[in-house]
Image (spheres, rainbow, N blue to C red):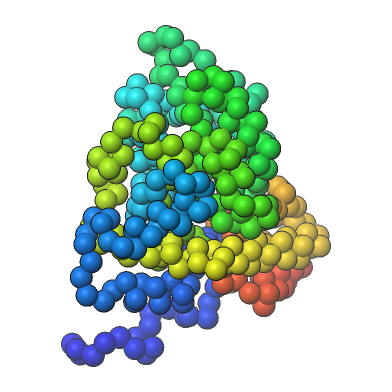
Amino acid sequence: MSDQAPTAAHRRHDPDARQFASDNYAGVHPEVLAALATANGGHAVSYGEDPYTGHLQELMSGLFGADVAAYPVFNGTGANVFALQAMTDRWGAVICAETAHINCDEGGAPEQVAGLKLHAVATPDGKLTPELVDRQAWGMDTEHRAMPQVVSITQATELGTLYTPDEVKALADHVHGLGLKLHMDGARLANAAAALGVPVREFTSDAGVDVLSFGATKNGALGAEAVVLMDPSQVSHPLHLRKLSMQLASKMRFLSVQFEALLSDGLWLRLAGQANAMAQRLADGVAAVDGVEILYPVEANAVFARLPHDVSRRLQERHRFYFWDEAAGDVRWMCSFDTTEADVDAFVAALREEISR
């Protein structure tokens, strides 16, 4: 076996190919890679005592308020499990939308790892409202039901829709009035911020969110998320909880520096804005094709559509994407920070060809 370092000739994928299956398919933004290389020289203190993690606290304070505390973690599921554990007692439960990632796509981790009960609520668009929360916000005084203690919302939602700042505040006020706390799963927080066009604190800390899972992996990072406590005094032993959740990085500088690169000079918003714009272009293109129905408002970087099953199957042979509800013929198309107009136009052209067959 050769001792030579890998070169372009050793690539096992086409670096020019882009798909519409997931924003996790995208690579790492060059500025993030450069930041990782900068953080790579020499030795730095481990487990978060490095200068990059120290600077991350300053960056997060600038976004959400002076008193917040940020804890870098490896992935979104870990961020959510850590965050929800920090907000609940051993007998606690979490109210969420049926479509929530914690309910559908985390392999039972909130239940198995955090020991939580999830009280799921059906929603028409992936969004909770005070009225929908009330369907599950009961039984706090009976030992026969897991006690609701937290409401978890997703921004942007799993259906690609957005909460406005006023909607988050109305939820937070209602939730707090019930004696509960509000968690936000921000796996696509950047897409929401770019689409809403307001400072991120307007729909997080200022609106009453108690704990935030701040995602970066879907927006140009190699693999970095953070749990942000808006009022750290309300959480006992967060450092121990992160360790118990298996989310303590020894070489934490490499997580923190990715956020530093993304948050510097608004890069995170520009990348998310590109993904959002391409989703809108895709929605506009496919909406003009007979036989295609757009299912939900396109407000971030996701497009949900219904089309004939056989068309989807043939199209999947040319472009990878997933069924959302195969029985109904519903599919999901995701755009990424590196999706181009040419990528979108080629996909729309392929769809037209398959529809016409």
Of 141 and 107, the residue lying toward us: 141
Residue 229 in view: yes
Q: Quadrant of the N terminus?
A: bottom left
Relative height, residue 47 to residue 159 (above, below): below
Where does residue 237 sit, x and y in percent of width and height?
28, 36
Residue in the image at 38% along x and 79% along y? 12
* Residue lying farthest to the front in this orientation: 66
Of 225 and 62, the residue lying toward us: 62
Relative height, residue 15 to residue 230 (above, below): below
Residue in the image at 27% along x and 42% along y? 239
Relative height, residue 64 to residue 122 (above, below): below
Residue in the image at 61% along x and 31% along y? 171
Count of numbered badges drawn on the protein: 0
Of 215 and 316, the residue lying toward us: 215
* Residue lying farthest to the top in this orientation: 142
Where does residue 90 sit, x and y in percent of width and height?
32, 24
Residue 108 in view: no
Residue in the image at 72% along x and 66% along y? 281
Q: Quadrant of residue 98?
A: top right
Where does residue 33 sit, x and y in percent of width and height?
40, 74
Q: Quadrant of the C terminus?
A: bottom right
Q: Quadrant of residue 317?
A: bottom right
Of 331 and 99, the residue lying toward us: 99
Where does residue 213 sit, x and y in percent of width and height?
45, 46
Q: Quadrant of residue 271?
A: bottom right
